[in-house]
Structure formats: C-alpha cells, structure tokens
Amino acid sequence: MKPIGPIPAWFAEEEGMLLIGGCGAASLVDEAGDTPLFVYDMGIIEAQIRRFREVIPARIDLHYAIKANPYAPLLARMAGLVDGFDIASGGELAMALDAGMDPSRISFAGPGKRDDELAAAIHAGVTINLESEGEGARALAIADRIGKVPHLAVRVNPDFDLKGSGMRMGGGAKPFGVDADRAAALARAMIDGGGNWRGWHIFAGSQALDPLAIIETQAATIDLAARLSDAVGTAPPLVNLGGGFGIAYFPGDERLDIRPIGVALDTALGALPDILQSSAFAIELGRWLVGEAGVYLTRVIDVKRSQGETFVIVDGGLHHQLAASGNFGTVVRRNYPMAIANHFGRAPETQPVTVVGCLCTPIDRLGDKVALPSVVPGDLVAIFLAGAYGASASPTAFLGHPSPRELLLG
Ligand SMILES: *Cc1c(COP(=O)(O)O)cnc(C)c1O
C-alpha cells in the first residue's frame, strides 16, 4: 500500500457521489458527454484570488501564468479577476488577447522566442521579458522594422533559488533569463536603444510549500532588483517578483499558508530601497490559482489481476494528466489524491490496487498500490489537483486517443 496525497477538504459527497461545485460527478460527465473529463470549479479559483487579495498587500499585482491552464472559458474569466497575464509563446499571446486581457497587462517570458513571436508581441504592445542579449538585439531590430516602440523588461537569472522548490528555475547555469551580473548592462543597452523600459522579471522557482522559503526569496529578489536598478541608474516601472506558491499534491504535504508572506511583504514594502519607491510589483502564479480547482474524471474500463496484484484500467491516462503519472518534472513518482467518484467516502478495501491509464506503456500509471473501495468497470475515478498542467501539458496526441473534454463550472 502506498499513500495518496491529501484530497482537498472541501470536496463532499451526496448519496455516495462526489460533488464538484455542488454537482454530482456522474451528472457532470453526462453534461459534458463522456469521460475522460476535466472539471474546473471557478468558485475555488475565486476563493484563492480572494485569499490572495485579503492577505497580500494591495500594491502587489496578481498575475496569472496562463500556461498552467489556458482553457479559453477559464482564461476569459481570469482576465476579469487578475491584474495581468504572463505568457510564454505566440500562441499564448493570441489566447491572452482573445480572453480580453489588456496588452499593457501582458508580459511575455520564455527562452527561444521566434522573430514572428517577438513581432506579434511588439505589435500588440505587450511587455517582453528578455531572456538574453541576443533576444534584446532582435527585439530592437524588429521594433525598428515595424515602427513600434518595444516594451522591454529583463528576466534575470538570479544568483539564488527558491528553497524546497519543486522545480528550480534560478541559481546556477540556466537557459532562463540573463545572469544577474550582466542584467544591468542589457537593461542599459535596451534603454539606450530606444526601448520603453518596463523593469525586472525575477523568477526563482516553483511549487514551494514553505512560507519562509518564499519570504526569503522575495526579500532577495527585492534586494537584487534594487541593486540592478542602481547599476542602471533608472527606477524600474515594474518588478515582477516571480511566484512559487505551491499546492499540496503529495502525502505529507500541507497547504501553503500565505499569511506570513503577506506580513513580510508589507514590511518589505514599508522599507523599500529608494530606487524602488515608485515601482509597481507583481507576483505571477499558475498552479496556486487553478490547480486545486480541477478534477480529472475517467471511467474504469477493466479490472484485472496479474500475479496477485489488481490493476484498474481507466479510459484516461498520462496523455491527459501527465503530472499524475509522475512524468512531469518530479524526481520520485508519488500518488496524487484520488477517489472513486461514485463511492466517495466509502471505506477502502484492504488490498491495494494500481490504477493505470489506457496507453500501451508502463509509465501510464495514475495510482500506484492505492487503497480504494471495491472497483468495477463503469466506476468513475476522480484525480484531484488537476486544474493546472493537465490537458495542455500532456502528450494528447500520443497513441491517438481522443482529447479530454473540459468543463468550467460557476
Ligand atoms: C511556469 C511559470 C510560472 C507559473 O508557475 P506555477 O508553479 O504554476 O505557479 C510563473 N512564472 C514563470 C516565469 C513560469 O515559467
């Protein structure tokens, strides 16, 4: 038997059926037409945003990193709820604009931006978070060619990283951003080259559950932004402090308490270095905003035994929910929280089962030796924490199965 991650406390049942946004899981499948299905509950996302607004100082804008979940109806709702979108491709630029986000509130990071993506971004007037000197030179040349002033920020590869981070993005040699010791020179070159200087983007890591680690990183980020700005001799209009707020996916994980982060930011904003006195600040979050709001529902096709073990085979798999299979940026495979949606709350059997997807590969394992109630074909398996890095972050074309359905509630 292996443990599963914690099922978020607000999920309840009615007559044994898991409720999502107040609706029974089986009727949601009927409404969507079939499994596999991602259901996103806007109410949970709104509650997270409220929590952020209550606790984090009002001077700090909330940006949504749309790669976490770019489902168009969800993006359209998010556009009215957050202060900006962070994008990472020309495709995401189109999605962000379609969602109605004001271009002046969009910033574009990501290594390897093509010329046509830079041109589209400059044309739209979004801020480009430059990832290298070469990209800066290309942005200026393209802006000159199309007769527009580019809005430019520099993404810094900080000389520290977010401790306990699930995915390290800063510290050491990285393909992301410009090393801190060259960032001021690039900023100066962009200003002298006629760019509209927007400031700094400093992203040190992702998926942290320790508030102290986040507080420490934010303090180091503000300090670095001030030092770089002093070196440039220009106040940055915006300092994007990165993100890193994690969610409790795995056994033993505890929900991140953001209150101490708010208190520390309040203190930091009260004692800002002179050069940052008039700057705006932003925090960019993906999974923390949307991850807990999603449930992946997949139907049991077969239950079979092999050498004393029971395998539950479902119609979904890693082609939709790669992260739950442990193949998306995790070192050790651990079980996401899961349940049988139509027997929610029922006591588990004593013998564990392994839940596998329908793909013909041994890595398509959604639950390894988990304790579940007795399962038969037709039952619905619910995998929680599926709101981020699900449908859009999985190899949907692999093996030619249909794409998952998606449904936004609320
Ligand atoms: C992916 C990414 C994010 C979002 O990360 P989460 O862990 O989903 O919050 C934020 N900023 C940048 C630069 C990213 O690449």
Image (cartoon, rainbow, N blue to C red):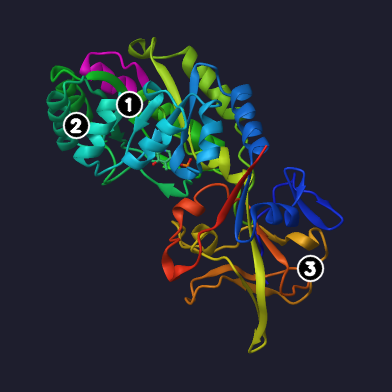
Measuring from the top left, give residue 195's x and y in whole percent. 20, 20
Instruction: For residue 222, say whether it is visible.
Output: no
Q: Which mark is residue 342?
A: none
Query: Alpha-carbon distance for marks 2 and 3?
Result: 57 Å
Above or below, comparing residue 388 to residue 375 in the picture: above
Q: Which residue is mark 3?
A: 348
Circle 2 SS class: helix
**Percent x, y for residue 288?**
55, 40
Q: 10 Å neighbourhood of mark 2: few (<14), some, or many (≥20)?
A: some
Of mark 1 and mark 2, the one earlier in the sequence is: 1
The picture places residue 254, in percent across and down from the top left corner, at: 64, 46
Nearer-the-camera pick, 203 or 327:
327
In the picture of the structure, the residue carrying the numbered disc 2 is 182
| Cα gap from disc 3 to disc 1, whole angstroms | 51 Å
Judged left or right of residue 30, residue 241 is left
Which element type, helix, strand or loop, lies under badge 1? loop
Label 3: few (<14), some (14–19) or many (≥20) C-alpha neighbours in 10 Å: some
Q: Which residue matches tag 1? A: 126
The tally of labels here is 3
Q: Is label 1's Cβ within 8 Å of ligand 1? A: no
- Residue 315 appears left or right of 200: right
Task: Locate the N terminus by quadrant.
Answer: bottom right
Q: Nearer the viewer, residue 216 or 140?
A: 140
Q: Is mark 3 within 8 Å of ligand 1?
A: no
Question: Residue 96: percent from the left, percent from the top?
Answer: 42, 33
Q: Is residue 91 magenta?
A: no
Compared with residue 192, is residue 203 higher up or lower down, i.e. above or below? Answer: below
- Magenta span of residues: 225-238
